[in-house]
Amino acid sequence: MNRARPVAHHASLNRLAFSATLHCLTGCSIGEVAGMVIGTALGLGNWSTIALSVVLAFVFGYLLTILPLLRSGVVLRTAIRLAFASDTVSIIVMEIVDNAVVLAIPGAMDAGLGSPLFWGSLALSLLIAGAAAYPVVRWLIARNRGHAVVHQYHADAADGHSSHH
């Protein structure tokens, strides 16, 4: 367990958790929207569309963590390991909540790409998913888990220490 940079102050913990949640939500949103658009455009069934969206949410969620790590000098294997360690729980929470909300809104999965119901339900589901993930992300960071693992690498890179192998 890494205790080098503990997050003790509530305001800084809240800011870091909010930032990490937005980061994760961005990756999930890109994948979720892409999956829903592709699945709807191809006329896939609800479950196939959801499966595609979930896979893409994980891909983009991990990529948004891996790419900055690679740019800061972290080797690919370490960047992948860090992304899995830091993002998996928050992506799982977001995907469960996001898809449950979309499924709970009558007609949302059957609405076409030009429908306000499609886009409104997708936007609402992502906002609720982010709100649901925030306390989980905050709890993990407070225990030097989740995004706190990656934050150390970003802080080191900002300080000029970028050789993480």
Image: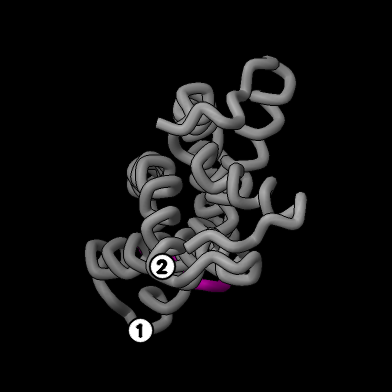
| Type of amino acid at the residue the image marks with label 1 | Leu
Q: Is residue 164 magenta?
A: no
Instruction: Give the x, y percent position of residue 123.
Output: 58, 51
Q: Is residue 32 visible?
A: no
Query: Distance of mark 2 from mark 1, alpha carbons?
Result: 20 Å
Whether 113 is among the magenta residues is: yes
Q: Nearer the viewer, mark 2 or mark 1?
A: 2
The disc placed on residue 19 is none
Q: Say if 91 sits above or below 114 in the image.
A: above
Spot occupied by residue 24 in the image (x, y as percentages of width and height): 54, 50
Could you tell me what secondary structure mostly forms the magenta stretch?
loop
Residue bearing the label numbered 2: 59
The residue nearer to you, when weighing 56 against 140, is 140
Say which quadrant the N terminus sits in. Answer: top left
Question: Who's the residue at 64% across and 61% down the image?
Answer: 162
Q: Is residue 21 left or right of residue 110?
A: right
Q: Magenta part of the protein: which range? A: 110-114
Left or right of 26? Residue 40 is: left
- The extreme right residue here reads 159
Disc nearer the start of the sequence (2/1): 1
44 or 126: nearer the eye? 126
Q: Residue at x 24, y 69 (%)?
A: 48
Residue 164, placed above or below residue 45: above
Residue to which mark 1 is pinned: 42
Three-letter code, disc 2: Val
On the question of residue 119 being in view, the answer is yes
